[in-house]
Amino acid sequence: MNLIVKPSALKELNEVSFNKTEGVRIEAVFVGSCSLYVNHHLWIDEKQTEDTKIEVEGIPFLISTDSLKYLPQKLYVDYNPPLGYKLSSDEETFKYNLRLTRRENK
C-alpha cells in the first residue's frame, strides 16, 4: 500500500505521543445491511500480530489484514482543523471529519 500523509496531517500527528507498540490504526470495516458500504475509522491502537505497519516520516500506521481488503492501493490522509482527518484516494473521499482517539480495550 502506498500511504501518502499530507503535510497538515503530519503536523497534527507529530503532536501525538505514541508508546513503542502503538500507532494510528486505519480501519475499514465492511457493513452489510440493506445498503453495502465500508465504514472507516482512525484510532491510536496497539499493534496486533496480523497488522501491517507502515511508517511515514516517523509516524506509525497500523492496518489489519481485513482492512487492507477494503482500502485502495494508494491512500491519502489529510487534516483540516475544522473538519478533522480525511481518508481519500485519487478517485474518492472515503470519510472526513475523523477524530483521532485512543482506542479502548476490546
Image (spheres, rainbow, N blue to C red):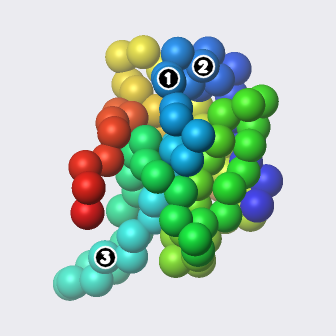
Q: Residue furthest left?
A: 34
The residue to which callout 3 is attached is: 31
- Please indicate whether residue 85 sits to the left or right of residue 63 in the image: left
Q: Are marks 2 and 1 in contact (CB under 8 Å)?
A: yes
Reading the chain from its start, which is encountered first: label 1 or label 3?
Answer: 1
The residue to which callout 1 is attached is: 16
Q: Residue furthest front?
A: 20
The nearer-to-camera label among 2 and 3 is 2
* Distance of label 2 from label 3 (alpha carbons): 32 Å
Q: Residue at x 58, y 54 (%)?
A: 62
Image x and y of residue 83, in percent: 38, 25
Q: Is residue 74 above or below residue 82?
A: below
* Distance of label 2 from label 1 (alpha carbons): 5 Å
Q: Is residue 32 above or below residue 75?
A: below
Q: What's under tag 3, amino acid-wise?
A: Val
Viewer-closest of 79 and 105: 105
The residue to which callout 2 is attached is: 14
Image x and y of residue 21, in percent: 55, 47
Q: Is residue 8 visible?
A: no
For disc 1, the neighbor class at 10 Å (few under 14, some 14 to 19, many from 20) is few
